[in-house]
Each structure stands twice: as C-alpha cells, then as structure tokens.
Image: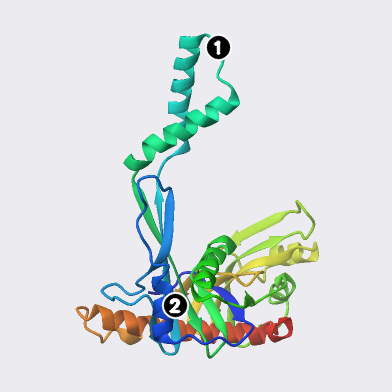
Amino acid sequence: MWFKNLKFYQITQPIELDDQLLQDKLSEFVFRPCGSQEQATQGWSVPLRQGDALSHTAAGNILLSLKKQERLLPASVINAKLADKVTQIEADTGAPVGKKAQQDLKQEIIHSLLPQAFTKDSYTQGFISIKDNLVVIDAASDGKAEFFLAHLRKAIGSLPVVPLARHSLSAELTSWLTEPLPTGIVLLEEAELRQPEDEGGIVRCKNQDLGSEEIQSHLEAGKLVVKLAVEWDETLTAIIQDDLTIKRLKFCDVIREQNEDIPKDEMLARMDADFSLMSAEAVRFANALRTIFALEQDQ
C-alpha cells in the first residue's frame, strides 16, 4: 500500500465522483483474464486485498488499481521456430521464402503458441484527491502513468488533468546545490548532472558530498541537476527528477510505525489505515512542491 514512485497530475476543472456511480463506471471496464488468443488484457481490479469494491476511499482520497495481464511469448522463441519453418520450406521447395510469407508464418506460429504461454500480472495503483485537485500515480515512467490515466478517462468519461510541473525544474534543482535550501528539504548524497546540450556529458554520483569542489566544478562547467536525492520534512526520502517524477520513495519509520498498533490479522483495517496515512503525506508533499517550485504559475 506504500507507493514507491509518484507521478503528480493537476485536475484543471472540477469533477464529481459519486461512490456508487464510480463503482458502476469502473465495473464496465473490470479486469478479465487473457483469452487463448489474446496477448494482453487490462481492467480495474479491487485495490485492497480481501475487499470487493473497485475503489476505496479514505481520508478523502480515492484509491484505484489497474491490472494488466500479458502472455509471455519471447521473441527468441518465435524467431527460432520461424527460422526452423523457413529452413524446412526452402529445403522442400528449393525456393526462398519471401518477407510477406515469413510474416504470415510468424503470425501462424504466434497463434499456435499463445494458448500455451504463461501469463504475467502487473498492477498500477493511483489515487484521486478531489479536495486538492490531484491525481497521484505509483509509476516511474510517463508511459505507465499515461496508460493508467487513459483507462481512467475511458471509464469515467472525462478527466481534465495536466502534469503538476509543465516545465523542466533542472535550474531550480541546480540552485539547491549553491543556495539556501527550501524549508523542509535536506540534500542526500546522490545526484545526476547533465550538460544541457544534446549528447552532452552526464555525471552520476552516489555517496558524494554535493557541496564538494568536484561537484561545484561540474556546475561551473554548465552542468544542470536532473535528479537529486532529498529528505523532506523528516517524513520521506526520494529522488526528485527535473520533470517532478518522484522515484525510490521511502517513508520514514516515524510515519510507517503510526499504524503498528493495528493487529496483523485485521488486514483490511491495516491497509485502509496505511493508505490513509500514505496518501495524506503524498498530498502534503505535492502541495509543498507546488509552493517550492511556484507551480501554481504553470496552471
């Protein structure tokens, strides 16, 4: 229930999500397993184990879970069978197999192998904060986050959102290495610096004092910070990227231990409490970043 990454999206117009109406809309796109000839399927699944609802609301935040199932059919297996088939046909006919014929053979092979292929399940979770006009997704890449948003938009009909940061924050992150830090921010010992030009130099450092002369020399040479490890408000540690993607998110023990008094056999209650706590801190972090980077001006 504790997200490991954060992608923040600003809701640009008021939306209303009645619980029952949301359930009805999500149920139209509920997850179903792959059929024998399907390479992938996706749909909404219950966000809390042992629960039965397709959404879960706590602390004013609505938790959703998108499930994807894929059939594992390695290209190496397909290509090996295709090569064997082409070799056999050419030996039998004495004529080469053309590209179009090979494509048809490849589709036949995929068709025959799909029903035997193993399946792999993956989940993308996110939550909606109506009060703070946010959608927050546990995703490290734009593609995964946009996949979640596209399916949510399809289910509820409309979802007017934009990334919370709509311009690169590399200049602001770079200033943190030379100027007083924003309130609540503590630098850790990891960063990535890049030359702004295409194919410019890249420096990745770990366990490195970011105030050292070595790092300062890279800044003087014109490199900008594109990733930076920080601690925020004694609450969490994370890598902040210049597009405001938050990676390697870890909530501090003082936060995670707040629900330790809930018995382990009360799993649903524990998951509800963990989500309430995690989502509230994620929203608080997003609002802090809004202020730090003056993101209201982007909207």
Q: Secondary structure at mark 2?
A: strand
Residue 95 point in image, percent of width and height: 55, 12
- Examine the image and state in which quarter residue 48 appears: bottom left
Single out the residue that lies furthest toward the left: 265
In this picture, residue 275 sits left or right of residue 167: left
283 and 70: which is toward the camera = 70
Residue, x 25% and y 78% (percent of image)?
A: 267
155 and 2: which is toward the camera = 155
At label 2, the amino acid type is Phe
Residue, x 49% and y 20% (percent of image)?
A: 86
Earlier sequence position, callout 1 versus callout 2: 1
93 and 148: which is toward the camera = 93
Disc on res. 197: none
Residue, x 34% and y 85% (percent of image)?
A: 273
- Examine the image and state in which quarter residue 32 appears: bottom left
Residue 276 point in image, percent of width and height: 40, 85
Q: Secondary structure at mark 1?
A: loop
Disc on res. 251: 2
In this picture, residue 25 sits left or right of residue 136: left
CB under 8 Å between discs 1 and 2: no
Label 1, label 2: how many angstroms apart (C-alpha)? 64 Å
- Examine the image and state in which quarter residue 226 appears: bottom right
Q: Nearer the viewer, mark 1 or mark 2?
A: 1
In this picture, residue 93 sits left or right of residue 190: left
Residue, x 43% and y 27% (percent of image)?
A: 81
Disc on res. 95: 1
Residue 280 point in image, percent of width and height: 46, 86
> From this viewpoint, is residue 252 visible?
no
